């Protein structure tokens, strides 16, 4: 019996002494702990921001710009709740993008130690700040008070953190857009990415949607003063053009690959059966027609140029 006790004691001592930390970083795939070890990995992380899922667009039928003759929307019906799949997915994707942007910013010193040039570091930082500004701006607009993480929280912190006031979230969104505009170039020679103009334009949009008109006007003026963008003079040509000076930030579809984004995927709903569509179930609304200003820049209920007998006379030339 004593011999058995001795063997058990030896085994127990061996097992206790051989305990190691099994919380290891995976060797077969990337993780936040072993990634960012090369310039290529950093660029791959930056490229990951440019997912269409991270830049969702509200459904056209949620507003009054489109008439859908055979359906209504949950926004119009007042039936949208937090349990809706679209809402849950957006919340999740915004915070996925935020977490990735913060991890990237937290690893920029490592990028410098790898020999990444300061110019590249500034661009990477600019693109990360651009997404932070966009995501927090959209979260503030759609949800109001939301979780505001500026540094990258731990899992334990995530369990107890509380929502921040909307005004604080918006202020940080503006700050991120300013940081992005300070770091990003006006244009790129090759593959298009977020630019200084995109940061200013999105800041103006976020401010406008949140009725902060002074900030919206200042950001829009700064974007205009870049002297890079101008309105395309024809809608039809705009949608088939290979390039336009009106485009600030966009995702391009590919007819050959049959890859489309947002409204282009629903185009058959918008044209008649004679043209190969589904009967024109969706069409521009009367409210949208009235929203176009006259050539003097004033809305139709203020401009003396408006002719109620001819909707298109003296209106926006597009």
Image (spheres, rainbow, N blue to C red):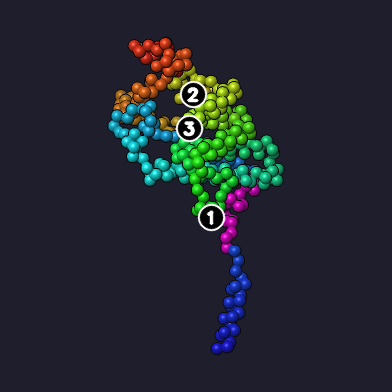
Please report whichever mark, 2 or 3, sits nearer to the chain's N-terminal start: 3
Real-space CA distance between mark 1 and mark 3, rounded to the nearest whole angstrom? 32 Å
Would you call the spot at circle 3 few (<14 residues within 10 Å), some (14-19), or many (20 or more)?
some
Q: Is residue 125 above or below residue 36?
A: above
* Segment tinted magenta in the rendering: 22-38
Mark 3 residue element: loop
Do we see residue 163 in this rendering?
A: yes
| Direction from residue 225 to residue 165 in the image, left or right | left
Name the residue: 37% across, 14% down: 311
Split into 4 quadrants, where in the image is the N terminus?
Answer: bottom right
Comparing 1 with 274, the one in front is 1
Q: Quadrant of residue 14?
A: bottom right
Q: Position of residue 152 (x, y in %)?
A: 57, 47
- Report the mark closest to the observer, 2 or 3: 3
The reply to whether callout 2 and callout 3 are in contact (CB within 8 Å) is no
Name the residue: 50% across, 32% down: 206
Name the residue: 69% across, 39% down: 117
Mark 1 residue element: helix
Name the residue beneath numbered marker 3. Answer: 210
Real-space CA distance between mark 2 and mark 3, rounded to the nearest whole angstrom? 32 Å
Name the residue beneath numbered marker 2. Answer: 241
Q: Position of residue 265 (x, y in %)?
A: 40, 33
């Amino acid at each position: 019996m004593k011999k058995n006790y001795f063997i058990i004691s030896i085994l127990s001592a061996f097992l206790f002494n051989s305990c190691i930390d099994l919380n290891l970083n995976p060797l077969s795939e990337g993780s936040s702990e072993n990634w960012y070890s090369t310039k290529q990995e950093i660029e791959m992380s930056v490229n990951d921001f440019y997912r269409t899922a991270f830049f969702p667009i509200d459904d056209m039928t949620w507003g009054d710009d489109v008439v859908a003759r055979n359906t209504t929307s949950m926004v119009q019906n007042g039936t949208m709740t937090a349990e809706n799949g679209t809402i849950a997915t957006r919340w999740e994707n915004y915070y996925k993008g935020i977490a990735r942007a913060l991890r990237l910013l937290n690893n920029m010193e490592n990028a410098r130690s790898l020999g990444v040039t300061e110019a590249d570091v500034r661009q990477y930082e600019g693109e990360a700040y651009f997404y932070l500004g966009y995501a927090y701006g959209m979260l503030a607009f759609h949800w109001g008070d939301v979780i505001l993480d500026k540094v990258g929280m731990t899992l334990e912190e995530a369990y107890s953190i509380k929502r921040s006031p909307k005004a604080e979230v918006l202020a940080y969104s503006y700050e991120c857009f300013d940081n992005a505009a300070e770091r990003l170039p006006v244009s790129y020679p090759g593959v298009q990415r977020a630019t200084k103009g995109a940061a200013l334009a999105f800041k103006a949009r976020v401010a406008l949607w949140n009725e902060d008109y002074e900030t919206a006007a200042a950001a829009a003026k700064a974007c205009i003063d870049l002297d890079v963008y101008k309105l395309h003079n024809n809608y039809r040509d705009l949608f088939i053009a290979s390039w336009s000076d009106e485009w600030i930030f966009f995702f391009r579809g590919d007819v050959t690959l049959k890859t489309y984004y947002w409204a282009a995927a629903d185009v058959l709903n918008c044209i008649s059966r004679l043209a190969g569509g589904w009967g024109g179930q969706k069409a521009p609304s009367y409210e949208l027609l009235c929203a176009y200003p006259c050539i003097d820049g004033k809305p139709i209920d203020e401009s003396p140029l408006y002719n109620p007998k001819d909707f298109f006379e003296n209106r926006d030339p597009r």
